Image: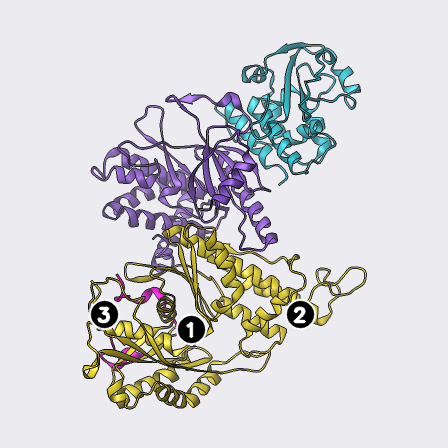
Amino acid sequence: MSQEIVDAVSQYLTPNVPIKLISQGAEAVVFTTPVHPYCPSNEITKDSKPVQYIIKYRSPKKYRHPVIDKQLTKHRTLSESRLLGKLYLIEGLHVPKLIATDAYNGYIWQEFLGEDLPNDCGFSNLKNYLWMNAKDPYNDVVKDTLFKVGEQIGLLHINDYCHGDLTSSNIVLVRDTNGTNWIPYLIDFGLGSQSNMVEDKGVDLYVLERAIISTHSSFSDKYNDWLIEGFSSVYKKQGKGGVQKLNEVLKRFADVRMRGRKRSMIG
Amino acid sequence: MQLPQFPGVNIEILLFQDVSNANDIRSKIAELPYAFIDARTICSVEQLMSAIYRVMIESKYNRLRTKSLHSEVLLALSPTSNIGEAFKKFGISDDTKNLIMIEINQDNDNSSLDKTVVNGEIVDFNDDNLQKNSDVNAIRKIYKIDQSVEFENISELSRATVNAIQLRGI
Amino acid sequence: MVNLNTVEPRNGRDYYIALGLEGSANKLGVGVIKHPRLASMSGGDNSHNCEVEILSNIRDTYVTPPGEGFLPRDTARHHRNWVIRIIKQALEKAQIMDPRLDIDVICFTRGPGMGAPLHSVAIAARTCSLMWEVPLVGVNHCVGHIEMGREITKAKNPVVLYVSGGNTQVIAYSENRYRIFGETLDVAIGNCLDRFARTLKIPNAPSPGYNIEQLAKNCKNKDKLIELPYTVKGMDLSMSGILAYIDSLAKDLFRGNKKNKLIFDRETGEPKITVEDLCYSLQENLFAMLVEITERAMAHVNASQVLIVGGVGSNTRLQEMMGQMCKDRANGRVHATDERFCIDNGVMIAQAGLLQYRMGDYVKDLSETVVTQKFRTDEVYVSWRE
């Protein structure tokens, strides 16, 4: 990762906003910071740790023509922010809070979600969480969590939105108030879109299924069943019309799987 | 008050209750170097600050659409890009009883905020006082939040306004 | 463990000789290569470093007049007319005295490609095999490109961008398969450039893509870009819409359709853009998309190396853009080959075929040599890698 990008971000944010790099994807670089961009009073502490915020930065890509680069950065930063804004209004759907957007420069500020799992199991995304439970893979809490993950995807799809990159690391788990169960949040909507096409929904489900199979292969059958149970429950609540829509999506999901075109999506 | 990314800019915010001279302020609003906002339209500190943050970002990259930072605050609060409409909705009217007075000072001078312009009682600018004076239905209407969307508490409404403010017109 | 000495060289030699025949599109290529027998197999995965020696690499391209593409029937006829002469030339250049004794294996392209040309070359391969009593190996064209690229550049485990007339794929190796991470949802990049070249009526020699590249280099207006759709869909991309749009611009330009204000100045009616501008914008747009999906795949599998193969891979602008992308990634490095190996050739078929042969995987019955127009890269079991 080139220092150049980190320097550019630090300069944009000024020394008043200290940052820590947490990941470099193909498109965006993600940092955390303890500083809120405009609400100092919100800096309350939880577990005696300072509240963190996420800064997602789409750095200029030197390989592409500046005209294309500007347009893409703006378009994608905006569409991700816009999705977060719209999805927030859907009852029951959990997405991170949007704090600020600077589309011209490619910055999005969001709330930080999740925590570090016990025993060095890593950050509390679904992938690490399932690893953590590998010794007791079918316990009730796991089942409840996966069902709820399915529900989240169902809510997303039934409202005609698609995630576009639904892997188990793009699902973050947050402890509920009792501290026993987990609430799943969908993150990273960089490839997300508003779409009523069953194809997009089928591919979403397929990508997640592959992710579960590739990282948790011994338990994947049951895990995927639980996910689909949760997913279906959302549609079934909508009565006959819902069931019909559900069947269309599940049929296309099976088609996509058969086609295996995306067979290799997960490395 | 300062924003971390804009250390050279001082922001003064005062919340007034039981204002008696709204009419008077309105008549000379063009000459006053402040922004005045009807407190009914603001439900949280977060909502107003997020608009001010947006103004500073727009200003830094020379994309202001109104004459001053102060008028830009009203536009930034609005979910639409219609400047006249923004002034009408967020600006004060003759019947305004509670208002917010803002000064954004880029020159790092001492504040020249003249509190005597407003005849009213100054109270702390905090979420409790804002919530007390806010009109939830008016805010929902301004931000065009569908009646089917239910909010459990004011902070959820506030979040929706922040989304609208950050996403306006871009 | 992979043992590349599973099959010993014939006639007690300490090296292998392979003849490769390629004819999946408008190029007919014949190559002869030599691999030394490895002394020990302890080095692990060695398939990217076979110490290949290229004894000959002959190619003949079926070139059509400007504005025309190559049709399967005519291309097949070209291949049939030339294949014997080219094989003879290749053997002579490689100093193969007696093919019965000196050749270990004959490799031919089984697919993907155009049916009729593939078929013509496969017949030649079968005939040689029966005549000389030399075993046959059917090779996947894409795997041929990948293996040749790895051998030439010594890139051990790169993400591969395969860009040619008929294919556009981002590939990475995992568990004995070259897996496709992203690809075109409609036309291939080379096809897209070829068809645009036809609209422009520019020569098809040496290749339409090369001529577009030269025109793009001469663009005087590089700050301004003609806005084209940017259609990356996750790790896939779509190009047919871009082609249709830029085609319509070119046609309006030629026809002098003054109503198109994008091309003609509102007041003077003079054209604002040139053919060079169109070529430049098209390349910039398409290549940005290619580099982006490659970077996505790299981030996904945590790779730092890229290998560009296929005919379009010889475009220097694409190589430059890929290099720039890699520079901004940790340890990033781009590998590319020149037109001898980028453009379809017989040597690459020989390279992939010989690897397969050395693992003991060759044709046992002629019924296995039926060519196939559709042959996905991930259908091949890659036994020669770990």
Looking at the image, residue B138 sits to the left or right of residue B155; the answer is right
**Please, what secondary structure does the residue beneath circle 3 have?**
loop
Residue C372 falls inside the magenta stretch: yes
Please indicate, yes or no, whether residue B99 appears anywhere in the rendered image.
yes
Q: Residue at x 33, y 61 (%)?
A: C156
Give the labeled residue for mark 1: C341
Give the labeled residue for mark 2: C251
Q: Residue at x 23, y 35 (%)?
A: A139
Which of the chains bears the disc numbered 1?
Answer: C
Q: Point out the tag, 1 or 2, that comes first from the N-terminus.
A: 2
Q: Position of residue C51 (x, y in %)?
A: 31, 71
Q: Point out the tag, 1 or 3, that comes first from the N-terminus.
A: 3
Circle 2 residues within 10 Å: few <14, some 14–19, many ≥20: few
Circle 3 residues within 10 Å: few <14, some 14–19, many ≥20: many
Amino acid on which the number 2 mark rests in the picture: Lys
Colour assigned to chain C in the rendering is yellow
Give the labeled residue for mark 3: C4
Q: Point out the tag, 2 or 3, that comes first from the N-terminus.
A: 3
Please indicate, yes or no, whether residue B44 appears anywhere in the rendered image.
no
In the picture, one chain is cyan; tell me its letter. B
Magenta residue span: C361-386
Q: Position of residue C211 (x, y in %)?
A: 58, 73
